[in-house]
Image (spheres, rainbow, N blue to C red):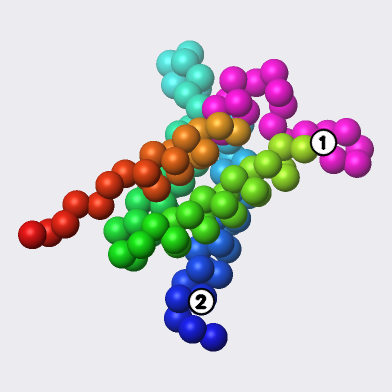
Amino acid sequence: MSSRLVSWVIALALGVLFGVMGTAVSQSRITVLGVAIPIGLVIGLLAVTLLLMGLRLLYRTRTAAIVAAFGLVLAVFLLSQPSQGGSVLLPANSVLALAWTFGPTVIALLVIAWPRFSRN
């Protein structure tokens, strides 16, 4: 296998992993002085941003970031569907769930569309 294909497979696996982990923790909150802070959503969106920005900085092309974003969005989509028993990980009536459903997609679009400035 070529090194390019290996990097794409790793990027896809990282995207899926970040999508699964982010979905699992996106509803987590901590309460500080009576204020509920959506720490799971904040950490998940920050992790997605850092992953995609890191892939954009590491490789000269956008391909690895696109592949990771595809895996990420696919994982979030699949995990947002109702299971056989009818339970869902991302309830449609939750602001946190809606933010996690659309947030990674918006971040991926911004990171991938961001121009690469030459060093000259």
Q: Residue 103, relative to residue 56: is it above or below?
A: above
Q: Quadrant of residue 65?
A: bottom left
Question: What residue appears at the point 27 percent right and 47 percent down from the top-left corner?
Answer: 115
Report x, y in % for residue 117: 19, 52
Magenta segment includes 92: yes
Instruction: Indicate whether 42 appears above or below 66.
Output: above
In this orientation, which residue lies closer to the viewer: 92 or 38?
92
Question: How far is disc 2 from disc 1 in space, using C-alphas?
Answer: 33 Å
Q: Indicate the amino acid at tag 2.
A: Val
| Between discs 2 and 1, the one toward the N terminus | 2
Q: Residue at x 39, y 47 (%)?
A: 112
- Relative side of 75 to 7, left or right: right
At label 1, the amino acid type is Pro
Label 2 vs label 1, nearer the camera: 2
Q: Position of residue 76 (x, y in %)?
A: 64, 43
Residue linked to disc 2: 6
Which image quadrant: the N terminus? bottom right
User: Residue 57: where, in percent of width, then height?
Assistant: 30, 58
Under tag 1, what secondary structure? loop
Q: Is residue 41 or residue 35 the one in the foreground?
A: 41
Q: Secondary structure at mark 2?
A: helix
Q: Which residue, given by chain and number where applicable, does mark 1 sit on?
A: 82
Residue at image location 48% in from the left, 13% down from the top: 34
Query: Looking at the image, can residue 24 be seen?
Result: no
- Please report the bounds of the magenta region as a residue range: 82-100
- Above or below, comparing residue 83 to residue 36 in the picture: below
